[in-house]
Image (cartoon, rainbow, N blue to C red):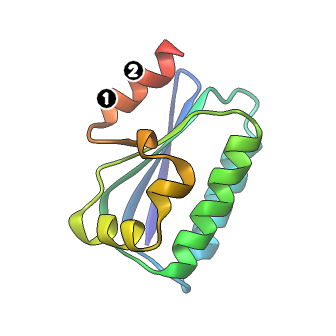
């Protein structure tokens, strides 16, 4: 799995490509640390357009990240979920835990929402 980080106007965007599972969570942790240590952080967007698979280990790491963002009152959104990834998130109850309002269809919509806050 590859995670590309992009920053625009204080919004940190994580672009996922590949599979997020037990064998690749170290890359996720590195990206999360980089974002959380940023000097200026207005919000975070996770772009899952090219994420083909996620297992419960990956979801657990994501939840840990989401809780850190929530504890800092930082907005974050998930965009571009594939049907397979969305099914895993639904089965594990992720929308109930972090809130359905954090799921967006388009990257641009998530950026606009953060900038409007």
Q: Is residue 11 above or below residue 20?
A: above
The image shows residue 99 at horizontal and vertical percentages of 50, 46
| Residue at image location 57% in from the left, 80% down from the top | 57
- What kind of element bears circle 2? helix
| Residue at image location 62% in from the left, 68% down from the top | 61
The image shows residue 43 at horizontal and vertical percentages of 58, 32
Left or right of 99? Residue 17 is left
The image shows residue 111 at horizontal and vertical percentages of 41, 27
| Residue at image location 43% in from the left, 23% down from the top | 113
Marks 1 and 2: in contact by CB < 8 Å?
A: yes
Q: Is residue 74 visible?
A: yes
Image quarter of residue 88: bottom left
Left or right of 2? Residue 27 is right
> Rounded to the nearest whole Å, what is the CA distance between mark 2 and mark 1?
6 Å
Viewer-nearest residue: 37 or 111: 111
Tag shown at residue 108: 1
Tag shown at residue 112: 2
- What kind of element bears circle 1? helix
Q: Is residue 80 above or below residue 111?
A: below
């Amino acid at each position: 799995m590859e995670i590309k980080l992009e920053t625009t106007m204080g919004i940190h965007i994580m672009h996922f490509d590949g599979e997020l599972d037990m064998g690749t969570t170290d890359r996720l942790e590195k990206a999360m640390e980089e974002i959380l240590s940023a000097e200026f952080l207005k919000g975070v967007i996770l772009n899952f357009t090219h994420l083909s698979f996620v297992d419960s280990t990956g979801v657990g790491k994501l939840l840990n990240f989401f809780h850190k963002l929530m504890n800092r009152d930082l907005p974050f959104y998930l965009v571009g979920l594939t049907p397979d990834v969305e099914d895993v998130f639904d089965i594990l109850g992720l929308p109930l835990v972090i809130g359905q309002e954090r799921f967006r269809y388009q990257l641009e919509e998530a950026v606009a929402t953060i900038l409007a806050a």
